[in-house]
Image: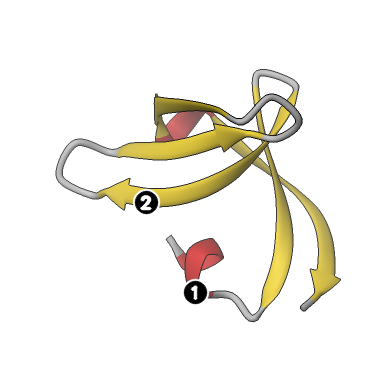
């Protein structure tokens, strides 16, 4: 997933909640994410992540 290597912050949503992607397991197509605002950590299917297109330069 190119989002992790991007030089910008790219907004990603999981079930209408903004998340920070910590890691990707390509074999299982799962992502380790942190729900922003709550600091809750989850393992979620990559297919359920939505890139909003909003980009913030780092």
**Between residues 40 and 50, which one lies in front from this camera angle?**
40
Decide: is 27 above or below 8: above
Residue located 51% across and 48% down the image: 21
| Residue at the image point whose x is 33% and y is 50% from the top | 24
Q: Position of residue 26 (x, y in %)?
A: 23, 49
Which residue is situated farthest in the front direction here?
A: 39
Q: Residue at x 61, y 31 (%)?
A: 39
Residue corresponding to mark 1:
5
Q: Nearer the viewer, residue 17 or 37?
A: 37
- Mark 2 packing: few (<14 Cα in 10 Å), some, or many (20+)? few
Q: Report the quarter where the N terminus lies.
A: bottom left
**Percent position of residue 29, x then y:** 28, 38
What colouring method underlies this structural image?
secondary structure
Residue most extreme to the left? 27
Say whether residue 7 is left or right of residue 55.
left
Residue pointed to by mark 2: 23
Element carrying mark 2: strand
Compare residues 40 and 31 and report the one nearer the observer.
40
């Amino acid at each position: 997933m190119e989002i992790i290597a991007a030089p910008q912050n790219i907004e990603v949503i999981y079930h209408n909640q903004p998340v920070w992607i910590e890691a990707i397991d390509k074999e299982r197509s799962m992502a380790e994410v942190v729900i922003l605002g709550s600091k809750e950590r989850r393992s979620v299917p990559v297919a359920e992540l939505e890139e909003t297109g909003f980009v913030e330069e780092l």
